[in-house]
Image (cartoon, helix red, strand yellow):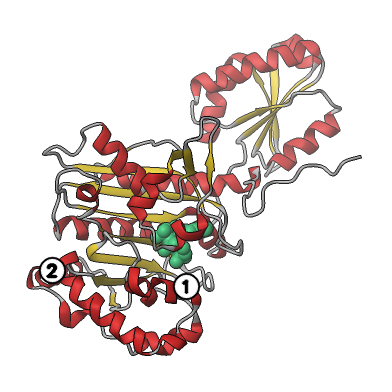
Amino acid sequence: MSKPLQSVKGMNDILPEETALWLYLEDTVRQTFESYGYKQMRMPVLEQTALFKRGIGEATDIVEKEMYTFEDRSGDSLTLRPEGTAGTVRAGMQHGLFHNQIQRLWYIGPMFRRERPQKGRYRQFFQIGVETFGMPGPDIDAELIIMTARLWKTLGLEGLRLELNTLGTSETRVKYREDLIRYFSASQELLDEDSQRRLDKNPLRILDSKNPAMAELIKGAPTFEEYLDEESADHFKTLCETLDQAGIEYIVNPRLVRGLDYYSKTVFEWITDQLGSQGTVCGGGRFDGLIEHFGGKDTPAIGFAMGLDRLVELLKDNGTTVNSAPDIYLISMGDLATKQGLVLAEKIRDQIPTARLLSNCGGGSYKAQFKRADKSGARYAIIIGEDETAAGTVSVKDLKEGDQSTVKQTELAQLMSDYLA
Ligand code: ATP
Ligand code: MG
C-alpha cells in the first residue's frame, strides 16, 4: 500500500481545537480595524510574477529565493503571493482607488514563502495587513501605531516592544547608500554570501542581516541619522511627539531598515522576546515611492502586516483560552424523539440566536449520549425520550450542578433563555 499523502513541508493544517483562538484573534482585529474606519479588500492569491519582482525589489530574500513561482499552462509566470502590499497597490491602481482619494484598507489571508520551516516561520503563513493611501503623515503614521497598540491591549498581550526608525526620502538615501557601500567594501571579506551580492544593489539590506557573524561589522556601520533630510526629521519628530502624548513607549532603532527599496520615512516593528528568534509579530512602514514606481501618480502610503501564526502562538503562550463549548447538548432516544428534538432545537435557536446547541445525531445509548454531552463541555443537557415525547415534555439537566427538572416542550425555549441569560 502506498504511504498516505502528507501536507507540503512548512504548510500546516489548523485543526478544530486550534481554530477557536484563530477566530478570536481575527474577530478582534477586524472589530478594531472597523472601529477606525478601515475597509477590507480581497486580492487573488496568485499574481503575475513581475508584480512582486517590481514591488518587493529584486535584491530581497523574498524575490531572490523564497517565491513559489511557476509557469501556468499558457506559459505565464505566476507567483503565489509572498506578501500583501504589492497586490493591494496593483488592485488599487487597477480600480482607480487612489485618484485624489484617501483609502484605509486591510486584508487577511495566506502568504507563501519558501523559507526554512521552524517555529514561527512557515511556508504558508497568515497575515493581516493594513495599507493606507493618500495621507502624507505623520498623523496617519501615528494612527497606525496607536491602532496596533490598542489591538495588543484588547488581546491582553503585554510586553511587546515597539521599535521605530526613519529612512528619510529615497533622494537622501543616495548619499548614505554610497557611504555604506564604501564602509562594507572595506571589509568585504567579512561579508557573507548574501551580503556580498547585495553590496552594490541593496546595501541597506545588509543592516537587516541576522547573521551573528556580521553583527560586529554592522554595529560599526554609519547610521542614517547624520544623512537625514529636514522634512523627514520633522516628520519623525512629530510622530514621536504624538506617540509620547498617546502614552505609547518606543525605542528608536537606527538599524531598523525593513529591506524594500520603496520604503521611506517611518518604519516600525512590534517585537516580543517570548517567541525566540521569530519575535517580530508586526512590521510596517511608509512606501511613498511605490505607486509612482508602478507607473501611477505620486501617492503617499503607509501600512503594516502582522503574522497571525506568531500572534496565535503568543496568545497560547499567555494562556489565552477561548470557550468554544456548546451551551446545550440535546439528547434524544428513538426516532420520534429525535425528530421532535431537532424541531425543539430550532425553537431554542429562534428564541436565543446566540445559543450554541449541539443536537445528538447518530443515535447511541443514553450512556453514550451523556458521555458525548460531557465531552462537549456543554453546561446543560436536554433529554427527550419516549415518555417525554408522549407527554409533550423534556428533561433539562444542569451538567455542572447535577440537578434535573422536567418542563413542558412549549416552555423550553423560554426556560433556556432564562438559564443562559
Ligand atoms: P522576518 O524578519 O521574521 O523574516 P519579515 O521582515 O520577512 O519577517 P514581513 O515581510 O514584514 O516579515 O511580514 C510581516 C510579518 O509577517 C512578520 O513580522 C511576521 O510576523 C510574519 N511573517 C513573515 N514571514 C513569515 C513566515 N515565513 N512564517 C510566519 N510568519 C511570517
Ligand atoms: Mg523574512
Which image quarter holds the N terminus?
A: top right
- Toward the viewer: 202 or 208? 202
Query: Callout 1, which amino acid?
Result: Asp
110 or 218, which lies in front?
A: 218
Residue depicted at 42% across the width and 68% down the height: 158
Amino acid type of disc 2? Ser
Residue count near mark 2 (Cα–Cα under 10 Å), binned few <14, some 14–19, many ≥20: some
Q: Is residue 345 visible?
A: yes
Q: Which residue is mark 1?
A: 194
Q: Quadrant of residue 296?
A: top left
Rendered image quadrant of residue 148? bottom left
- Judge left or right: residue 368 versus residue 159: right
Residue that appears at 35% across and 84% down: 184
**Is disc 1 surrounded by few (<14), some (14 to 19) or many (20+) residues within 10 Å?**
some
Position of 342 with respect to 287 (left or right) is right
Residue at the extreme front of the image, as rendered: 75
The image shows residue 327 at horizontal and vertical percentages of 60, 36
Q: Work out whether 216 lies above or below 155.
A: below
Label 2, on which residue?
Answer: 232
**368 or 289, which is in the foreground?**
289
Q: Residue at x 38, y 36 (%)?
A: 42
